[in-house]
Each structure stands twice: as structure tokens, then as C-alpha cells.
């Protein structure tokens, strides 16, 4: 199995583990959009307890990639996503971004 396929498989397992039915094509597209960062131990994970990390998710992904406007709803969506993944120790970036894409209905960006 390729390294990319392993990342997609682990992401789907993590989503399934928290009760989310994963769209494999979208998970794959989100992973592809993240580029080589998905293979790096540090950049492949989101540090949910680090406010600077969560700010980067908001600025670089939600505003930069998804084209959303900054506001309290972005912080609320990130908090909701982290609550969904509460029991997960190592939150995969692919999973976090997938949940945010679904939350804001931005799947078309990856089609």
C-alpha cells in the first residue's frame, strides 16, 4: 500500500471511530490538497490545545483555502470539530480539514 493510501485509510478509520461516515473521495481530495505535509509527523497532526495552531487552521485553511470570512462562526466550527474528535489523541490534519469542509459545505472546492 502506498504512503498516500495509508494516510487516507487512517483518516477514514479516525472518522469512523468518532461516528462520522466518511466520503472516501473527499478524504482523498483533502489529503491530496495538503501535499507532502501529510507525511511529516508534526505537520500531519493538529495540536488542538495550541491556540496558535488553531489560529493557523482558521487563517490558512478556512479563510485562505475555503474562502470564508473571519468571524466567530469560524472559531465555533473549529471548537465543534475538536469536540467531535475529543477522544482522539492524535488528530489527523486530513480529518480536521475534512470535518471543516463538510461543516461549511465546501466540498465543491475539492471536486
Image: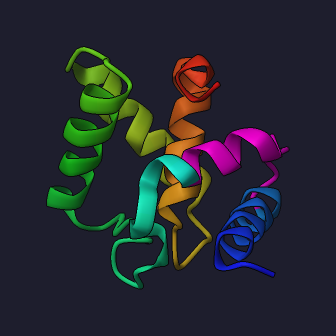
Q: Is 69 situated left or right of 91 in this image?
A: left
Q: Residue at x 68, y 50 (%)?
A: 28
The answer to which of 92 and 39 lies nearer the viewer is 39
Would you place residue 90 above or below residue 9 in this image? below
The C terminus - image quarter: top right
Does residue 5 appear in this view? yes
Would you place residue 75 above or below residue 72 in this image? below
Is residue 24 within the magenta segment? yes
Q: Residue 2: x percent and y percent?
A: 73, 78
The N terminus - image quarter: bottom right
Q: What residue range appears in magenta?
A: 18-31
Q: Is 54 situated left or right of 36 in this image?
A: left
Q: Residue at x 77, y 60 (%)?
A: 12
Does residue 83 appear in this view? no
Query: How did the renderer colour the structure?
Result: rainbow
Q: Residue at x 82, y 58 (%)?
A: 16
The answer to which of 52 and 86 lies nearer the viewer is 52
Q: Residue 39: x percent and y percent?
A: 48, 77
Q: Residue 65: x percent and y percent?
A: 33, 31
Q: Give the image quarter of residue 35.
A: bottom left
Q: Give the image quarter of residue 86.
A: bottom right
Amino acid at each position: 500500500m502506498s504512503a498516500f493510501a495509508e494516510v487516507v485509510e487512517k483518516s477514514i478509520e479516525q472518522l469512523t471511530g468518532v461516528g462520522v461516515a466518511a466520503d472516501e473521495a473527499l478524504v482523498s481530495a483533502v489529503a491530496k490538497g495538503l501535499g507532502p505535509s501529510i507525511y511529516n509527523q508534526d505537520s500531519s497532526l493538529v495540536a488542538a490545545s495550541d491556540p496558535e495552531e488553531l489560529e493557523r487552521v482558521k487563517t490558512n485553511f478556512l479563510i485562505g483555502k475555503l474562502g470564508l470570512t473571519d468571524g466567530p462562526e469560524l472559531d465555533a466550527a473549529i471548537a465543534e470539530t475538536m469536540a467531535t474528535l475529543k477522544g482522539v489523541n492524535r488528530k489527523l490534519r486530513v480529518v480536521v480539514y475534512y470535518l471543516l469542509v463538510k461543516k461549511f459545505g465546501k466540498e465543491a472546492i475539492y471536486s
